[in-house]
Image (cartoon, rainbow, N blue to C red):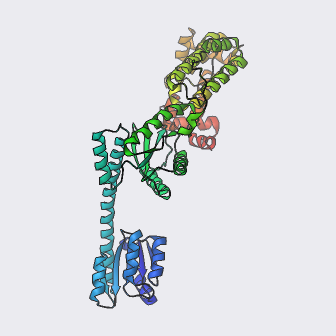
Amino acid sequence: MKLLIVDDEELTRTGVISSVDWKSIGISEVIQADDGVHGLDAARLHRPEIILCDVRMPRMDGIAMLERMEKFLPDSVPIFMSGYSDKEYLKAAIKLKAVNYIEKPLSPSEIKEAVLEARDLYMQKMHSRRGENLKSMETASQLALLLTTPYSADTGRSIEELSGELKLTMNASTGFAAFIVKMDDSVQPGAPSFAEIYEEFTGFLRQYHMNCIYTEKKMQYLVYFLFGQTELSAQGIKAAGEFLKDRFQSFVRFSMAAGENVIGVAKAYQTYASAVILLQNSFFFPEDTLITVEEKEEAVSEDLTMPSPEKDFAEALLLGDGKAAEEILDSLSGVFLGNRRFLQNPVKDLYYRLFLCLEESRRHQKVAGSERTDSIAETIARCFTFPELHQTLADKTAAYFRDMAESQQENPTIFLIKQYISQNYMKETLSVKDISAHVFLSASYVCTFFKNETGRTLNQYITEYRMEKAKQLLQDSRYKIADISSRVGYSDGNYFGKSFKKHTGLSPSEYREKNLQ
C-alpha cells in the first residue's frame, strides 16, 4: 500500500517518515507533499490508499483537500493530525470518515496504530467493493442475456427491474448496437480476463457517451450491448469495433460482427439478431475480421448453385495434372471467399469430399507421404475460417503432387511400408514386427530390404518421420508440447525432448519459439 503524508512543516514530515518501520506494517511507498494543492497533485499521480494529513495548511487546508480527493479516490482512508483541539475541525474530519485524529506532538506508536487501523479498514472496503462488483457484473450479464431474446411484456418487466438495480436507463429512446465476438478455442497464455477487457472497454466508451453490458454464450461467444441515451453515433460504433478488434487480436483468433444501430429497448433484440446473421458469414472472411451491416449492401450474383468440382478434381489428381487441380481450387476460392450467399456447412461438406478425393488418389496411385494423418473431420474442425480451410486443402494438394513425383520410382513394398508407418506412427508400440506382418515378410528380411532400398534403417525412418510430424505440430501454438509428445508416439516426454534435440539441435520449446516469431 502507499501512504501520502501532507503537512506544511518539513520537520514533521521527515519525523513521521523516519519514526516508523513502514514496510513491517505493509506500506511499500511513502509520498510527501507540503500543502493541500500539492497533496492533490500527488494523490492523482500516485493514488495512495492511506492519507495522513495536517488540518491547517496554507493555500488549501486538509478538509478541503480531502473533500476534493474523495471524488477520485473514494476508497482511500484519511487520518488527520493537528495541534489544534478544534471541535469544528474534528466534526469535519468525522464527516469525511477519517479513521483517526492524532494530536500534535505526534507519537510514533500512535501513528503506527492509526495507520494499521487505516490499513485494515481499506482492506475491508476492498473486500466489500469486490463483492459489489461481482454482483453487479452478474446482474449486468443477466440483463445482457435478456436482451438476446425477443422483446415481450414479461422480458420488458425483467429488463426494467435489472436495469433499475444497476441504475441504468433503458427505455424507448435508448440507442443500442450489439457486437458478437466468436473466439477460437486456443487462447494465448497470459491473456487478460473478459472482465478486464470489459472494464477497459466501458472506460473507452465514455468519451462517446456510451455504456456497455456483456454476457458469455456457449463458452465461445461474447455478446456486447452498447447503449446510450440517444441514437448511437456511427463514429462511436466504429471506434468501439476497432477497440475490440485490437484487444482480442493480442491473444486469440476471432471473428466479429456488429448489428444494426437501433433505438428503443424493444429493438435491442433486433441488433443482436442482425449480428448473429452477419456472424454466420464470418466463416468466409479472414480471421480477426469485423463484419458490419454496411458491408452487406455489396452486389451479389443471382447464381446460387453450389459448385461440384469433385469429378474434375479427382481426375486432375489421378492424371498428375497439378495445374488443373490448382485452377479448380482457385475457382473455389473466388466463389466462397467473402461470400454472403452460401452457408458454411454445405461448403464444409464440399471440402470434405475434396479431401476424400486426395486420400483415395493417394491409395490408388500408391503415393505415400509426410502429410498429417488426422481424420478429415478433425482437419476441417481445426480450421477456424474458410481461408484457413481452403489453404489447408491447397497445401495438402501441393504435397500430394510433390510426393507423387518422389514416389513414382519407388518399390511397391517400400510404399506399403511407408504408408503403414504414416498411419501408425502415433502408436508407441509400433514395431518392426508389426510392419513385417503388414507386408507379409519376415522382420529380418524387411529390415535388410528397407535399408538397401532407402539407405536408412526402419527405426531411423520411423524416428525421422515422428520428428518431422512433431516439427509440424510445434508450429501450431494450439498444441501443448506434452500433447505433441504423445501424438507422435512418445509416452515419455523427457525421452521425446532428448530425441527431438538430437534430431534438430533444438529442444521442442526452443524450436517452437524460433518458428513462431
Whether 135 is drawn above or below 458: the answer is below
Asked if one can make out residue 445 in the rendered structure from this viewpoint, the answer is no
- Left or right? Give the position of 504 relative to 251: right
Residue positioned 51% across, 33% down in the render: 485
Asked if one can make out residue 72 in the rendered structure from this viewpoint, the answer is yes
Whether 31 is drawn above or below 169: the answer is below
> Quarter holding the C terminus?
top right
Residue positioned 71% across, 15% down in the render: 321
Whether 356 is drawn above or below 335: the answer is above
Depth check: 477 or 381 in front?
381
- Left or right? Give the position of 122 relative to 178: left
Return the x and y of residue 224 as percentages of the image width and height.
43, 45
Depth check: 478 or 293 in front?
293
> Quarter holding the N terminus?
bottom left
Which residue sits furthest front?
173
Return the x and y of residue 47 as percentages of the image width and height.
44, 70
Occupied quadrant, residue 58: bottom left
Depth check: 19 or 101 in front?
101
Which residue sits furthest top?
440
Return the x and y of residue 490 as percentages of the image width and height.
50, 31
Q: How many marks?
A: 0
Return the x and y of residue 187 as percentages of the image width and height.
49, 42
Residue positioned 68% across, 18% down in the render: 325
Whether 231 is drawn above or below 502: the answer is below
- Left or right? Give the position of 480 relative to 71: right
